[in-house]
Image (spheres, grey):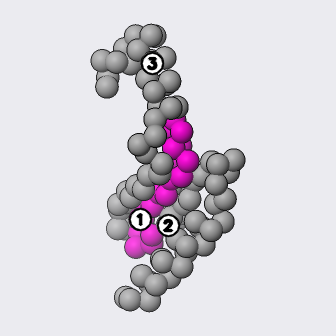
Amino acid sequence: MHELTRTRLGTRLFVRLARHQRLIALFVTNVRGPRRPLALAGAPLEHVWPVASLGGNVRLGIAAVSYDGVLRCAVHCDADALPVAPVARALGEELTRIAALT
């Protein structure tokens, strides 16, 4: 992939392919963060939220990150392509069910 995007023509070709691909509709990513709190110059890092960008014609992304014993999730979607509320609601319901198991 790196070789393809080294030239201007290759980059344009890659962008065109990404915008027209039909194999990937969504992605899910998880980043395991530190289990203990962090600080920078004495200021505590209180919250960490996941952010993931949608690329090409991928319409939905779900990102998760854990930090200091807390798991946070975010739903990123192309609002012109699909309604995010049902996806976010379903994710919330499933996370509630998982939390009830512990």
Between discs 3 and 2, the one toward the N terminus: 3
Label 2: state its secondary structure.
Answer: strand
Q: Where is residue 98 in the image (x, y as percent from the top left)?
A: 42, 82
Give the magenta range.
51-71
Query: Could you say which quadrant of the image residue 102 lies in?
Result: bottom left
Q: Which residue is drawn at 58% across and 65% down?
A: 87
> Is residue 50 found inside the magenta-colored segment of the image?
no
Which tag is nearer the camera, tag 1 or tag 3?
A: 3
Can residue 28 be seen in the rendering of this structure? yes
* Residue farthest along the right direction in this orientation: 80
Label 1: state its secondary structure.
Answer: strand
Residue in the foreground of this view, choosing between 54 and 73: 54
Label 1 and label 3: CA atoms lie apart by 36 Å
- Residue hosting label 2: 72
- Residue hosting label 1: 66
Q: Residues within 10 Å of mark 3 (few under 14, many from 20)?
A: few
Number of numbered discs present? 3
- Residue hosting label 3: 13
Amino acid identity at mark 3 = Leu
Q: Position of residue 71 (x, y in %)?
A: 45, 69
Horizontal side of residue 31 vs 21, given as left or right: left
Label 2 and label 1: CA atoms lie apart by 6 Å
Q: Residues within 10 Å of mark 2 (few under 14, many from 20)?
A: some
